[in-house]
Amino acid sequence: MKNLSFSTFKTVASVGMFAALLAATTGCVTTPGGYNIYDDIYEDVYKDSHEHKKHKGKHSKNDKHDKHNYDSAVEQRATNKVRSMGYRVKDVKYKKGDRKIKVKAERGRDDYKIELGYPSYNVIKLKKH
């Protein structure tokens, strides 16, 4: 049997270490499906919190909170439009999907019902009540 020289031993040792590091790196980079690298970072902060568990899975297109925010923005813009016309706004009604915004307003001592078109906010009907 032939004795290994020092340079051959050094080459074999460095190739072995390289192979071990390559295997470890490959194992860290290729993860099983469904694993998200950010889960580990934020897991302690969010997933165990009471608020996360309370609201988990409740977000959808028909979420009441989102609907309220959308309706509020439409109603606020309608209010600003009617105020700029010189009326004092009493009530604004808007249902998502409707093409009209109904506004009850006052000018002087007279009450008015005003219908605005959506999304243009143009006056469709103005009726003294």
Image (cartoon, rainbow, N blue to C red):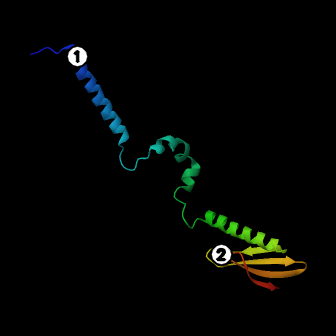
Answer few, some or many: residues within 10 Å of disc 2's Cα (few below 14, many 20 plus, some between 14 and 19).
few
| Residue 4 left/right relative to 114 | left
Q: Amino acid at mark 1?
A: Ser
Q: Secondary structure at mark 2?
A: loop
Residue 101, located in which quarter of the rendered image?
bottom right
Mark nearest the camera among 2 and 1 is: 1
Number of numbered tags placed on the structure image: 2
Q: Residues within 10 Å of mark 1 (few under 14, many from 20)?
A: few
Q: Is residue 70 above or below residue 124?
A: above
- CA separation in Å, label 2 and label 1: 82 Å
Q: Nearer the viewer, residue 65 or 17?
A: 17
Q: Position of residue 30 (x, y in %)?
A: 35, 43
Q: Which residue is mark 2?
A: 95
Q: Which mark is residue 7?
A: 1
Dot placed on the residue nearer the N-terminal end, 2 or 1: 1
Left/right of residue 18 with respect to residue 59 in the rendered view? left
- Which of the two residues, 7 or 41, is positioned nearer the viewer here? 7
Q: Residue at x 65, y 79 (%)?
A: 99
Identify the residue shown where x is 59% and y is 51%: 51
Query: Which quadrant: the C terminus?
Result: bottom right
- Left/right placement of residue 27 relative to residue 84 reads left
The picture quadrant where one finds residue 12 is top left
Q: Which image quadrant: the N terminus?
A: top left
Q: Compared to 71, does 23 lie above or below?
A: above
Q: In x, y percent, where is residue 121?
A: 71, 75
